[in-house]
Image (cartoon, helix red, strand yellow):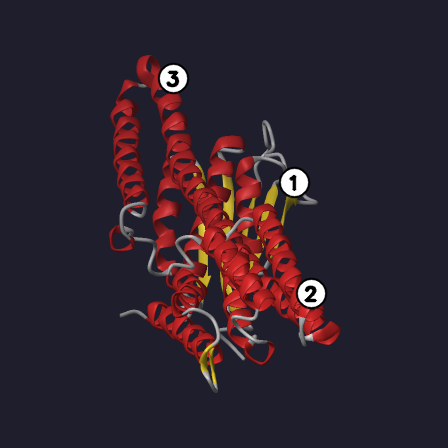
Amino acid sequence: MTLRRLMDVALASAAWLICWAAAIEATGFHEPVSLTVLTVVLLGAPLLVRRQWPIAGTLVISVTASLALAVGIVPDYASTGPLVAVAAMLYTVGVHVPKRRSVQTALVTTFILLVGTVIADVSSDGPGIAGTAFAALVCAASWVLGWTLRERHRQAELSAARATERAVTEERLRIAREMHDVIGHSLSLIAVKAAVANHVAEKRPEELPAALAVIEATSRQALEELRRSVGELRTEADFAAPRALGDLSHLVDRAASAGVAVSLDVRGGEDAPESVVLAAYRIVQESLTNVVRHAAPASCRVDVAAVDGQLRIEVADDGNRRSGPSRDGMGIAGMRERVTAHGGSFSAGPCPGGGFAVVATLPYGGAL
């Protein structure tokens, strides 16, 4: 038997015992035994099914309690039994019934019970004004407690739903950035080498195989990275992110094949967490993609250094941009979002002596 069922049985038993004891006076039953039994059953039985039929059970108990108090089946000194039964049902109504119907049921129930106490007070030595006010207070407090718990549960569910939706949105944005960086970088290199291949096909055919080889190698690498990124949607174990900053050399080699001479300098950062390494890798990848796309042929300097618990990335080129990357472009925005997610700083813009520079810092607390 579950805890909830045990609580329902305990409440019903308490109501039965109190009402049954109150019906037995010193000289025996004042009313017919059948009427007493019926009253006790109607006051306790609905408590056993209060979660299944909260409104019907509340109305049955409130009418029974009101009549029992009014005609004296349950005397004033034993009104605790009916009051506990009504309070338990009103609490259940507050928890399980929607607000509008819940309020209506609570008002009707309280009114019915108060009618019984007033009749008992007028016809005999009833509970009086204080007792009637106390009954109303108990009814109101029981319903408010149940309704408050219902609202707390509803707010918790809404918060959980919003958190889930926010997590899904953030994950989609993160995957979109990954796909943009992987595909954009590779396709930019392929487009550049395809243009070279088309240009030299007739004039310098001996250079055509080299250009096609770069296109083939870049395509294979792009497919591999795309497979790894898509694999992250299935399981984390399938996703092979860059494990060390030394993997940046692969980006340098690919940029060099597209006409960008890159000098790479990596100092420290061995203790940087994987998320920071991945962010640094994608920032360098996107920056080199912009150089290839907008400034090649050019020279470029990539400087990555771990200083005072943060990873500083600087990518600067000396090219003359045919169409400089906009600050609002997806690549720049994606890099800024990555840096912001790690609590770092980011800047991107033209250099005073020409060219373009991207500077980012990614704190990770490696040094204290």
Instruction: Give the residue furthest to the top.
Output: 202
Which residue type carries mark 1?
Answer: Gly
Q: Which residue is mark 2?
A: 118
Res. 327 in view: yes
| Horizontal and vertical percent position of residue 264 | 44, 54
Which residue type carries mark 2?
Answer: Val
| Horizontal and vertical percent position of residue 275 | 42, 59
Q: Which residue is mark 1?
A: 354
Q: Which mark is residue 318?
A: none
Instruction: Of the two numbered discs 3 and 2 on the same chain, state the one appearing first in sequence.
Output: 2
**C-alpha separation, residue under disc 3 versus residue under disc 2:** 102 Å
Residue beneath the point at 49% across and 79% down: 22
Q: Nearer the viewer, residue 50 or 110?
A: 110
Instruction: Of the two numbered discs 3 and 1 on the same chain, state the one appearing first in sequence.
Output: 3
Q: Are marks 1 and 2 in contact (CB under 8 Å)?
A: no
Q: Which residue is mark 3?
A: 199
Which residue type carries mark 3?
Answer: His
**C-alpha separation, residue under disc 1 versus residue under disc 2:** 93 Å
Instruction: Of the two numbered discs 1 and 2 on the same chain, state the one appearing first in sequence.
Output: 2
Residue beneath the point at 37% across and 63% down: 48
| Horizontal and vertical percent position of residue 249 | 36, 52
